[in-house]
Amino acid sequence: MTGDPRLAESALRSTTGGEQPPQVARVRTRDALHVVPAYKPGKPPTRVEGVTPYKMSSNENPFPPLPGVVEVVAAAAAEMNRYPDMATTALRARIAEHVGVSPQEIVTGTGSTGVLGYLVTATCEAGDEVIYAWRSFEAYPILVALSGARSVQVPLTAGEGHDLPAMAEAITANTRLILVCNPNNPTGTAISARELEDFLAQVPPHVLVVLDEAYVEFCTDEDRPDGLEFYRDHPNLVVLRTFSKAYGLAGMRVGYAIAHPPVADVLRKCVLPFGVSDMASRAAIASLDARDELLERVATLVAERERLAAELVAQGWDVPHTQANFVWLPLREHASAFAAAAEAEGLSVRAFEGEGVRCSIDAPEANERLLRVAGAFRSQLG
Ligand SMILES: *Cc1c(COP(=O)(O)O)cnc(C)c1O
């Protein structure tokens, strides 16, 4: 009965008490909210007697924070009575040095999801259109719906990749923003430099294109696009990066956009004041400073990914070529049953009902167990 508005009304009555007339709240909210879908976060694993549980449902990094990170965060914690630097000056300078642009071209936020929110706020109002592939990152339809704009979802190809020609065709006079998720979450597929080049040539200069590179560090394809190079050649391109995946700072909430100064200046107007904490800034800087260890960890995860993908193919699975830190099993109507089978073995994976299951690359023991679950499930399917 919690959804019954009358219940809230009577609760208000009882607290006012006495002879007071009843207070009835009828708060007006935006109609746009009726169509906002809910974000379904990856579940933690269920405890199973005698086995180590693994969370393979959120594409997190199984490694702990990089060396030195916990120490700088602990030191910064002692100053949490102070607001952070609102302009994240030190972090932006360090990121700018890392990617080879000026600090003015860096806009930080609470994860790249936060920055994506700024991008939508900066470009969209009611009636505008945002084009993106589907299925892709779950936050896209939420952020677009919140703005009052309309999502134009272009189905993935048969190979579970972006259909860039169809996305170019979907551009109308109302298009304000195009999101390209590369590699794509949750299918892991990546586009080539050539495909991106052809696509960008068809986008009018007033339409902003966001290249969401949340998993770029894991992308090893030889023909992969260099986001920064494309950025330099296209004034309407923004590159979005995060510290949540390869850098292992998902809990710190820090990400950034690389945007040309006129775009970056507009984005800064949309920024949530003091969104990025001092602890998050320092953690991100220390993580960028630990480059060698980062590359080592990424190489380990990529090697595990390749092993897992190859074995799944050997088991007979039709897994799309993944370039991220997860694999996609196109299970369709069996997605939930597979997730339940994994859960029974202490593994949580992310099921998209009727579509497939996304499994994040974890420690070798977890990946091994996932292979066993997948093998058993496959033989059961016949
Ligand atoms: C995880 C992810 C992000 C960023 O997440 P944050 O934790 O908010 O930085 C952005 N895009 C995609 C496609 C992702 O999978």
Image (cartoon, helix red, strand yellow):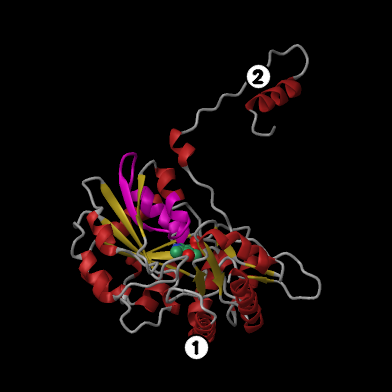
Structural distance between the alpha carbons of marks 1 and 2: 62 Å
* Residue 18 vs residue 166, the one in the foreground: 166
- Kindly tell me whether residue 120 is visible in this rendering: yes
Q: Is residue 120 magenta?
A: yes
Residue 292, numbered circle:
1
Q: Quadrant of residue 18?
A: top right
Q: Position of residue 156 (x, y in %)?
A: 37, 62
Q: Quadrant of residue 267?
A: bottom left
Q: Quick one: which residue is furthest to the front in this view?
A: 382
Residue 75, numbered circle:
none
* Residue 164 vs residue 117, the one in the foreground: 164
Q: Position of residue 127 (x, y in %)?
A: 31, 39
Name the residue located 61 percent from the left edge and 79 percent from the top edge.
371
Question: Is 1 on the left or on the right of 193, as rendered?
Answer: right
Write down the residue under mark 2.
23
Which residues are drawn in magenta? 112-141
Q: Quadrant of residue 125?
A: top left
Q: Position of residue 48 (x, y in %)?
A: 77, 69
Quarter of the image that includes the N terminus: top right
SS under mark 1:
helix
Q: Amino acid at mark 1?
A: Asp
Name the residue located 57 percent from the left edge and 63 percent from the top edge.
350
Q: Position of residue 161 (x, y in %)?
A: 37, 67
Quarter of the image that includes the C terminus: bottom right
